Image (tube, grey):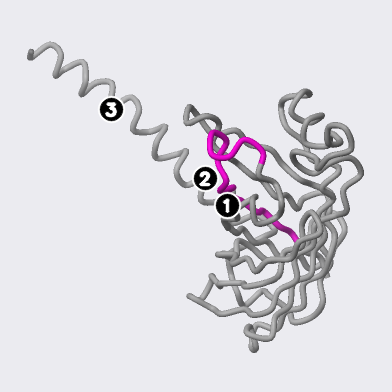
């Protein structure tokens, strides 16, 4: 027991200098990032979605065994924001459903497949129109978070959706010099609300959404 204790103590003493060096370096690197979670950096104005760095992830449960997930990208739209009047902020974004991506070529095809014999598609069908989210109200829940209520149009159906949004960073983009804002958000929708009832309940009706968004001024 004494031998094990000595070995453990020696290992800790050897590791301590590395820990003392790595921790300040991590803090230093974070401080050097162009984007900082500092609301005072947010300038009022109209911002455009950075299509290359704005993503909507979705996940649904498969047969009660595990969750499956996919992603939408190439998102376009605008954010109007004034830090002094957050309740007046407006978000209007479009999501190209036809570009949905999953890890399965078979599922990709199924999501965009036409219905059998001219019937209703199981999911989006071929050449689906982009989805669109337009905010109707923004309520701050903390200094860096807000509840964004809006109308989501998907598969030709419009339903209210609530996003729990968190401000994640603001600053000057290091390559293009534009003022940039970052946000993350979560929401939950029922696909049956949007006409997609295929395989419910063995494939979950509820779909969890995770959003990572960047906007440039």
Q: Secondary structure at mark 3?
A: helix
Q: Is residue 34 left or right of residue 166?
A: right
Q: Secondary structure at mark 2?
A: helix
Q: Position of residue 113 (x, y in %)?
A: 84, 34
Percent x, y for residue 183? 64, 61
- Residue tagged by mark 1? 30
Q: Nearer the viewer, residue 81 or 59?
A: 59
Residue extending furthest bottom?
A: 85
Other residues around mark 2 within 10 Å, as few (<14) / some (14–19) / many (≥20)? few
- Residue 74 belongs to the span the image colors magenta: no
Between disc 1 and disc 3, the foreground one is 1
Nearest to the observer: residue 57 or residue 129: 129
Secondary structure beneath dot 1 equals helix
- Neighbour class for label 3 at 10 Å: few (<14), some, many (≥20)? few
Q: Is residue 201 magenta?
A: yes
- Residue 13 — which label? 3
Q: Are marks 1 and 2 in contact (CB under 8 Å)?
A: yes
Disc 2 from disc 3: Cα separation: 21 Å
Name the residue rendered at 79%, 47% in the picture: 73
Residue at x 58%, y 52% (from the top left corner): 30
Q: Is residue 22 above or below residue 172?
A: above
Q: Please tell me in which quadrant of the rendered image residue 93 appears.
A: bottom right
Q: Is residue 160 above or below residue 61?
A: below
In x, y percent, where is residue 3? 12, 11
- Residue drawn 65% across and 69% down? 160
- Magenta residue span: 198-214
Q: Which residue is mark 2?
A: 26
Q: Looking at the image, is mark 2 or mark 3 nearer the viewer?
A: 2
Q: Quadrant of the N terminus?
A: top left
Of residues 73 and 22, which is closer to you in this image? 73
> In the drawing, does residue 76 fall left or right of residue 23?
right
Residue at 77 percent of width and 57 percent of height = 154
């Amino acid at each position: 027991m004494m031998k094990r204790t000595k070995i453990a103590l020696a290992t800790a003493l050897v590791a301590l200098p590395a820990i003392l060096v790595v921790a300040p370096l991590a803090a230093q690197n974070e401080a050097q990032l162009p984007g900082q979670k500092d609301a005072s950096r947010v300038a009022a104005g109209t911002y455009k979605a950075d299509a290359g760095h704005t993503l909507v992830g979705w996940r649904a449960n498969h047969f009660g065994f595990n969750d499956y997930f996919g992603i939408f990208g190439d998102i376009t739209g605008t954010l109007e924001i004034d830090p002094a009047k957050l309740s007046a902020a407006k978000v209007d974004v479009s999501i190209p459903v036809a570009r949905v991506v999953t890890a399965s070529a078979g599922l990709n095809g199924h999501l965009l497949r036409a219905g059998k014999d001219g019937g209703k598609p199981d999911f989006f069908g071929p050449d689906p129109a982009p989805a669109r989210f337009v905010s109707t109200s923004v309520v701050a829940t903390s200094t860096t978070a807000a509840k964004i209520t809006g109308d989501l149009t998907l598969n030709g159906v419009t339903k209210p959706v609530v996003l729990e949004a968190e401000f994640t960073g603001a600053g000057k983009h290091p390559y293009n010099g534009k003022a940039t804002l970052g946000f993350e958000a979560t929401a939950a929708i029922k696909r049956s609300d949007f006409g997609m009832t295929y395989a419910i309940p063995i494939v979950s009706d509820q779909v969890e959404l995770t959003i990572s968004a960047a906007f440039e001024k």
